[in-house]
Image (tube, rainbow, N blue to C red):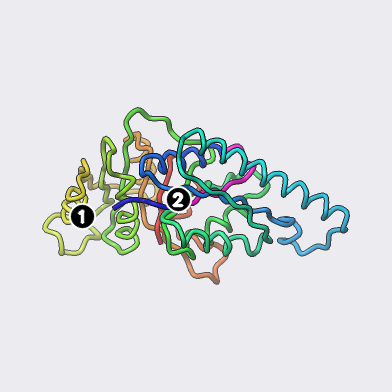
Amino acid sequence: MQVKDILVHLDNSEACAHRAEAAISLAKRQQARVTGVALAVKSITANYIGIQVPKAISEAQRELVEAAAQTAVCDFERAAQAAGVEFDSEIIYTTAARAPDRMAYKARCNDITFLGQPNPDEDNVAYMNHLLEGVLFDSGRSVYIVPYIGRIDMAHRNAVVAWDGGKKAARAIHDAIPLLQGRGKVTLMMVNAKKSSSKKDAQPGADMLRHLQSHGLDVSLENISANIKTDYAILNFLSDSGADLLVMGAYEHSRLREKAFGGVTDSILHNMTTAVLMSD
């Protein structure tokens, strides 16, 4: 099992360099190709509030957006070339409303997509949430989300795998195996498993533990008993374990609701301080 094609979203945010670095680093380890895609988006504000912008202003903004996309692509290409990995790049011209669909389509043609965690302090946080939601739930591929504060620099890479016995978690674990191989430590984490587990396992999590070990992973099982919500238990365990990666399934509410992200997914995405790989 090997990752061969990696996609990374490029923009002019400070966090983009960390995102590109993470994607390029995986490409180097997996001997994979990495493609950087910048979205040259027409007025995000105008698209969301439905206003007409004078032509002169619109043209000036278009030039700024295009220049920002070009800069992001050039920075990515320099970093990829310096790392000695096979790479490609593209600028997609689109509206804010269509951007998630365009990016989701590109993601379908790759093994994994690197996106950034939306920064609540930036003006485009609504757009970034929309983009992340679209790729995560509509691409059919796993998404590697890099915190806006940057990646944790660790000498020994440790991962936590959140396992609840469900199909979304199983999909995330399957997609993550190439990233987990070669790590110093992998912890298969369950929260209050005795309360929620079916009787299919003699010991909750034992079957998944054996499956991960069959892939050559140094993995241990932790069943956390907690009187707090699952998302808080996961975040606390991540902090205590010093992990640099969380693997989990993604959950969403009905599209008719204001927020598409489910409770645990939403909480993790907005409070994460380490990279998260999610699959729907």
Residue 12 is one of the magenta-drawn residues: yes
| Sequence-first disc among 2 and 1 | 2
Corner quadrant of residue 259: bottom right
How far apart marks 2 and 1 lie (CA) works out to 26 Å
Q: Residue 91 at what x, y percent from top left?
A: 63, 53
Read off the residue under disc 1: 208
Q: Residue 150 at what x, y percent from top left?
A: 50, 36
Q: Residue at x 57, y 36 (%)?
A: 78
Q: Residue at x 79, y 50 (%)?
A: 61
Q: Is residue 96 above or below residue 25?
A: below
Q: Magenta part of the protein: which range?
A: 6-16
Q: Amino acid at mark 2?
A: Ile
Read off the residue under disc 2: 6
* Residue 264 visible in the displayed image: no
Circle 2 or circle 1, nearest the eye = 2
Contact between marks 2 and 1 (CB within 8 A): the answer is no
The quadrant in which the C terminus is found is bottom left
On screen, residue 47 versus residue 208, left or right, reads: right
Residues packed near mark 1 inside 10 Å, few (<14), some (14 to 19) or many (20 plus): some
The residue closer to the viewer here, 261 or 3, is 3
Q: Residue 121 at what x, y percent from top left?
A: 63, 42
Q: Amino acid at mark 1?
A: Met
For mark 1, give the secondary structure. helix
